[in-house]
Image (cartoon, helix red, strand yellow):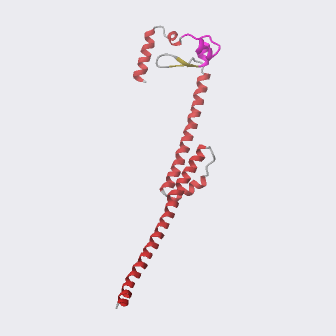
């Protein structure tokens, strides 16, 4: 009788053991599949984003083919990656446009026949063009700025005109 009861208790235990092993095996399989998904969907694109940042920082050539392939993949992080690249490209173009505009302004400022100067809000002159230096009788812009008189007081016949101009600029921009 004892042997029969042990035998009958053994079958549910074996069933439980097989069930436990099956659930454990299935859980490990799900974890491995999830880990592969995380690696492919999150980790690799994040590492590519970091590589892109390094390439930009080091001013290296960026592989456009990889970006096009990633854009087609449609993953959110790949989209972030390509958006980041697009943002950097836009910024580089904007900086180049700004540099060209500065060159154009500088050329106009330096070659103008009229005297042009810049002052602080307080009236201190900090930049003049060569024509302004010639008008005041100086050989160079540097001579005028370092040795010259207070231009702002010489430009206005009445000191209140200077104050009126500064007030108008403050109000109207």
Above or below, comparing residue 24 to residue 95 in the picture: below
Q: Which residue is at a point 47% across and 66% down the rendered structure image?
A: 31
Above or below, comparing residue 95 to residue 173 in the picture: below
| Residue 71 on the magenta span | no
The quadrant in which residue 169 appears is top left
Q: Which residue is at a point 62% across and 10% down the rendered structure image?
A: 137
Q: Which residue is at a point 39% across and 84% down the rendered structure image?
A: 10
Q: How many marks?
A: 0
Magenta segment main secondary structure: helix
Q: Which residue is at a point 52% across and 9% down the rendered structure image?
A: 154
The quadrant in which residue 159 appears is top left
| Residue 142 on the magenta span | yes
* Whole-percent x, y for residue 85 in the image: 54, 48
The C terminus lies in which quarter of the figure?
top left
The residue positioned farthest toward the right in the image shown: 139
- Residue range in magenta is 129-149
The residue positioned farthest toward the top in the image shown: 157
Q: Which residue is at the front of the view, 167 or 147?
A: 147
Above or below, comparing residue 46 to residue 107 in the picture: below
* Whole-percent x, y for residue 37 in the image: 49, 63
Is 32 on the left-hand or right-hand side of 99? left
* Whole-percent x, y for residue 172 in the image: 41, 23
Q: Which residue is at the front of the view, 94 or 16?
A: 16
Q: Which residue is at the front of the view, 133 or 91?
A: 91
The residue positioned farthest toward the bottom in the image shown: 1
* Whole-percent x, y for residue 171 in the image: 39, 22
The N terminus lies in which quarter of the figure?
bottom left
């Amino acid at each position: 009788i004892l042997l029969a009861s042990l035998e009958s208790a053994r079958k549910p235990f074996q069933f439980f053991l097989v069930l436990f092993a099956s659930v454990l095996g299935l859980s490990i399989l799900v974890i491995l599949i999830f880990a592969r998904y995380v690696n492919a969907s999150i980790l690799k694109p994040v590492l590519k984003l970091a590589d892109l940042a390094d390439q930009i920082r080091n001013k290296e050539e960026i592989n456009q083919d990889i970006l096009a392939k990633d854009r087609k993949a449609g993953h959110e992080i790949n989209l972030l990656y390509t958006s980041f690249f697009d943002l950097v490209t836009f910024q580089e173009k904007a900086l180049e446009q700004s540099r060209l505009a500065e060159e154009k302004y500088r050329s106009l400022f330096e070659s103008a026949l009229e005297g042009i100067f810049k002052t602080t809000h307080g009236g201190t002159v900090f930049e003049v063009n060569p024509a302004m230096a010639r008008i005041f009788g100086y050989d160079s812009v540097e001579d005028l700025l370092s040795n010259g008189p207070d231009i702002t007081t010489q430009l206005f016949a009445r000191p209140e005109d200077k104050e009126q101009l500064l007030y108008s600029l403050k109000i109207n921009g």
